[in-house]
Amino acid sequence: MKYFRVILLTLMTAAWVYLTSVHYSGLNSIQGIANYHDGMLSLNAPRSAGHKVIKGQGKDAEVFVDTLGIPHIFAGDLQGLAYATGFMHARDRYFQMELIANTVMGRLSTILGEAGIGSDRYWIRFELENRAQEYLDSIHDKAPDLYHYLVAYSDGVNACINAESARERDPMYKIWNYSPGPWKPYYIFLVQSYMSSELALYDDYFNRQEILDKLPDAIRQMLYPTQPADQPTIIPSGHSAGHNLAYTGSPAPEASGGPQITLFKPGEKNNYIPREFNRSLGSNNWVVDSSHTASGELLLCNDLHLFLTSPDIFYELHLSCARLHAYGFSIPGVPFILTGHNDKIAWGITNGGWDVTEQYLLKVDPKSHDNYWLDGQWKAMTKKDFVIAVKDRPSQKLTVRYTVFGQVVEKDTFTFSLRWHPLYSCNAVASFWRLMQASCWEEFGSALRYYDYPSQNFAYADVHGNIGMICAGKMPVKPEGYAGGVLDGTRSPIDRYIPFDSLPHSFHPGTGYLFSANQQPENGKYYYSSRWFDDLYRPRRIAGLLSEDKKVGREKFLKMQSDTKDLSAADIAALLKLYFPDTMLSPEWEKMRNWDGVLDPGNQEAIFYKVFRRSAKIEGEELARSLGVRSSPGYDQLMHFLAGDMTLSYDSVTISSSRCFKHIVKMTDSLYARYKGEKGFKPFDFHIPQMTLLPGLDIDVNDLGGSDNTINVNYGAHPVIRTLIQIKNDTISSWMINAIGQTGRINDRQYYQQLADWKKNSPHPTQFTANPRELKYIRENILFEHK
Amino acid sequence: MIYIKYIALLILFFLLHFFLSNTWLIAAWCLLGIVSCTWIREARHPLLNIMALELVIGAAFWTFFWSGNEGLRQIAYHSGTSPVLWPLLAIAVNVLTAFLCSTTFFYLTRISVKPPVS
């Protein structure tokens, strides 16, 4: 009995020691977290006050950090600026920087363990690390200034990392049981690739192909149009400004393209499940000239809509040296101002969303699956082997085949090649480098001449009173009549791009204002995308507000940035009038007839509207099912169809706007009756997850309104930053806000310091001064000196 | 005499917590179990004393190092937890591990070493 007890005790102890020492999903063990020597409790709070002198290999620079954690960097030259920027980026966000770089290199599993394998299998086949190295080598001779700037930045990052002891590191390193590695100058190109993927690596071409193959033009143009009709384009040519209701006008024009190949026969099932893509990603920017403002100033606004995590991806920065004085938001890992201003010009960006991804259907040799048919002959695919290193687990092997188009992908029954154009060019880094030093429209244009990915719409204003817009990117030319489907993989790809001078742009438009909200750039001859129908209400709302015959000021634009009026409310009222002119519906529906569309989370109509949106989504899915296609029409498209009051037939299927809307009304009533009794039904609430999705670190937000149609987007994506820039009497002033905070360190008080102000859209005035003595609210001063 | 032994162990383990973690600390607790059986033989409740010893060390760390740690307060604030939760959990894990490891080795030693003839 005595021995039995001891054995039992030994087993219990062994089990406890094992369970508390094991690394779950790549996380540190309980013993690792709880020990006093180097566990969580041993970590020091970040030192962020007082005066510090850092002597090293660095350049001379001085940093003043204000109470929001924003570094104001003053240096003798550009390299000094880069060094100090690297130091500050690393101090506040190095874990995030490494996470992004490792994700893109296909090495996420070295940080997250098994949880990263899926991501690594996806990314490693792009071979982006090798390409990034080549890009850096290529600028060594072409742009030595930029090359040395990037090297100095990298030195600054590594100086910070090397100076930090394990106890001073970001707690994420402890939680994930990981030690930081060195930063290399070419990692900046990985960040560009990451953003290109986040913003434009679409995978829905097979679904688009199915629509092109199966549906007749009449249905396709109504529910899945390539080009929406009568919509405000970014470049103002013939759009009807001030026209607020989206779909009371004429239906879309005839089809402007069709399938390049035939893939789906009528009745054939499509089992292709595309990679999930957040459709709410986008942004707003608008710029007005002096004719539109009360006191003759120029105003430029920009808010970037991305999936919001803590920390978010942007970092506020002030750079000043003899050659450059700029302020705005950078991305950790990228030592440039991406949206902001210098002392001569201001700019803001929104996502272009162009089709820079292509899927080529391959004809594979039935005798040898490693051959494919190209230009009249069989060609051999090339093969490459990859090894994925996984933390605490054995490595994984992966073999990938490639064609002239790119990697070969087998999904469902299809074998296709993925051609992702951002793989072959990485010039955005050089463009932003020149952009932040530009001082006029010509220099702005020449900075963007070689800009490639991700495609962006750049709004512009300068101290000379000019405004403009350039939709920049390296857009591959598509075959004649292309409408967004799969491409023919038996012919060599077209290797041409739309020339820069043919890209949509505008300078000093007659309207006195310009804006972009991810809508179609222009009604020109080139194809850019077929997804414009996902974003129609938001551009309409911006166009409506900007074209009001009023002299605006800063306050009006701040209000506009927080605007939560959904224009589809007017369309719902129009639909009720159309289909239920004299019928008394439920009290909620009756209120909808006169609702202003403002999505306030406490408002009953707003809550009812959210239920309506759920019903509309279900109805859209049913509509797609009845038509035999996988993609359901988006909300904007569905409303287009409903407003048309039409009956369309295809094969043995008949779809009717009236029947659909009546069904939605019924479903909304029934869903609302179910939801309103539920205590936890708060349709506007959302959570901001920590960037590695660690449970317990979510931030709950429950007091914001808005939808995917409102200027203040609150649905899947959120305005992660907002800027407002004013140019008056040759002077540029700005106000900015970050949704979360400057630092990514959870043990720092600035972790989500700006959240409350972001919710109210109360941006702080920036301290854009070339004289450090004029800076206020400084709590830390760091001096970098040569050894 | 017994108290002197415990004071010596208290100081020793306080220092060990400074310099050792995970496997090494577990090994130290296992040794403590052996020592409890062979050296601190007079103690009535040697294993409970080890728990008490760990509690005192935890309390000392809390008082001297963690209570003024601003970073810890920020972590608690940003994770919506109480600032005392993290130290309490850490102490609990250490006390429990110390207790189990030393107890196991205490009994393993006792059954394998003959008690001295009095």
Image (cartoon, rainbow, N blue to C red):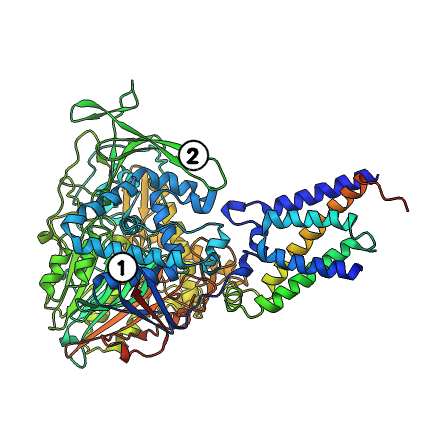
**Residue A293 location, quadrant:** bottom left
Give the camera-side residue of A350 and B117: B117
Tell me residue A210's x, y (percent).
29, 38
Q: Which residue position is annotated with label 2? A: A396
Badge 2 sits on which subunit?
A
Q: Nearer the viewer, mark 1 or mark 2?
A: 1
The kind of residue on which mark 1 rests is Pro
Residue A376 visible to an observer of this rendering: yes
| Mark 2: amino acid | Gln
SS under mark 2: strand
Give the left or right position of residue A722, taking residue A590 as reference.
left
Which residue corresponds to mark 1?
A: A335
Relative image position of residue A760 (x, y in whole percent): 38, 73
Could you tell me residue A242's position as x and y percent? Answer: 19, 68
Instruction: Name the quadrant containing residue B64.
Output: bottom right
Q: Quadrant of the N terminus of chain B?
A: bottom right
Q: Please state the horizontal and vertical placement of residue A74, each as a whole percent of the image.
A: 26, 70
Q: CA distance from mark 1 to mark 2?
A: 34 Å
Q: Is residue A593 left or right of residue B74?
A: left
